[in-house]
Image (cartoon, rainbow, N blue to C red):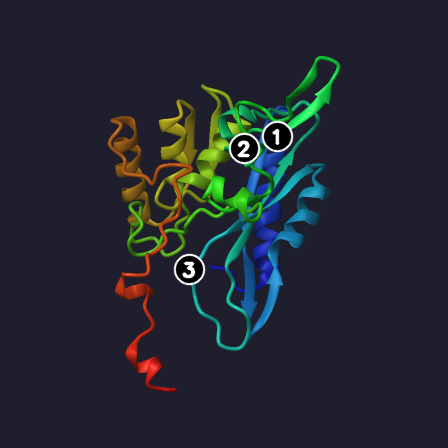
């Protein structure tokens, strides 16, 4: 689609300039991005977009790490297993709804001393999910603060023909935290309609753009399923599945054992 990284940056800056002129002062931009790899050289795209957004007077509120467990296996470098999500606002009067996206407290019984005696120190509604997303919210705080939602691969219930589909859970957390019912949610790279379908399911107005007719057809089908409450998605906050020791996929193959 783009002849070079510079051509890509130029096109994206035009889009970001348009977003800046259209976005309300209370609005947000969530920009999910990975790396550009050419001839084995990796360029982290988030630092490029940080500079572009800054030029257009956006304020970075969080640089979120989304970790996943599966993807392409590299041979001459460590395999990439995360992407970044940059959350920008236009000003200080932005929306942020923490309660709908809180995760369970790891130490709900922890207390602190007050004038009235020892009281629970945490919030009964749960804990802030932090800026490192591993879509196993409870486990992430027992081990490390990661947003670890499984990416959409072969056996994922949301899998379509799109090669770079991201899970509903990523969009869902952003929509719940940064918008209100009735707000408009725009996805300029709609793909198979994950964001617009999630917006519909959360009583927001989803708008998306997609030039590939195959993905556009699927996006419209999924949007209609969301309207009917029939869209199959992975439940937000559900633990990523881990194989138990009795499953063949979790056992060391005999061929490896024979290697000594």
Please state which of the two labelled residues, at mark 2 or mark 3, is closer to the viewer.
2
CA gap, disc 2 and disc 3 = 27 Å
At a point 42% along the width and 62% down the height, the residue shown is: 71
Q: Residue furthest front?
A: 117
Q: Earlier in the sequence, mark 2 or mark 3?
A: 3
What numbered label is drawn on residue 105?
2
Residue 177 coordinates in the image, percent (x, y)? 53, 29
* Residues marked 1 and 2 touching at CB (< 8 Å): yes
The residue beneath circle 1 is 110
228 up-or-down from 9: above or below: above
Closest to the observer, 205 or 62: 62
CA gap, disc 1 and disc 2 = 10 Å
Closest to the observer, 242 or 99: 242
Q: Earlier in the sequence, mark 1 or mark 2?
A: 2
At a point 48% along the width and 48% down the height, the residue shown is: 148
The residue beneath circle 3 is 70
- Residue 39 sits in which quadrant? bottom right
Residue 236 coordinates in the image, percent (x, y)? 40, 36
Q: Residue furthest top?
A: 116
């Amino acid at each position: 689609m783009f002849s070079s990284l510079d051509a890509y940056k130029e096109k994206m800056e035009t889009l970001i300039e348009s977003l800046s002129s259209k976005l309300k002062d209370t609005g947000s931009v969530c920009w999910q991005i990975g790396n550009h790899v050419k001839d084995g050289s990796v360029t982290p795209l988030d630092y490029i977009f940080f500079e572009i957004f800054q030029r257009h007077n956006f304020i970075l509120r969080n640089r979120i790490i989304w970790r996943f467990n599966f993807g392409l296996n590299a041979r001459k470098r460590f395999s990439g297993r995360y992407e970044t999500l940059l959350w920008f606002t236009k000003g200080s009067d932005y929306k942020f709804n923490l309660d709908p996206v809180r995760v369970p407290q790891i130490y709900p019984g922890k207390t602190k001393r007050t004038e009235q005696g020892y009281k629970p120190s945490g919030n009964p509604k749960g804990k802030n999910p932090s800026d490192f997303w591993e879509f196993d919210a409870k486990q992430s705080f027992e081990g490390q603060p990661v947003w670890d939602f499984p990416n959409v691969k072969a056996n994922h219930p949301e899998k379509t023909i799109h090669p770079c589909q991201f899970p509903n859970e990523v969009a869902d957390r952003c929509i719940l935290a940064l918008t209100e019912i009735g707000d408009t949610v725009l996805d300029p790279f709609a793909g198979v309609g994950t964001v617009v379908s999630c917006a519909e399911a959360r009583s927001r107005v989803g708008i998306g753009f997609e030039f590939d007719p195959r993905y556009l057809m699927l996006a419209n089908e999924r949007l209609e399923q969301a309207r009917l409450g029939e869209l199959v998605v992975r439940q937000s906050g559900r633990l990523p599945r881990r194989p138990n020791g009795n499953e063949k996929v979790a056992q060391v193959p005999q061929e490896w054992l024979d290697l000594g």
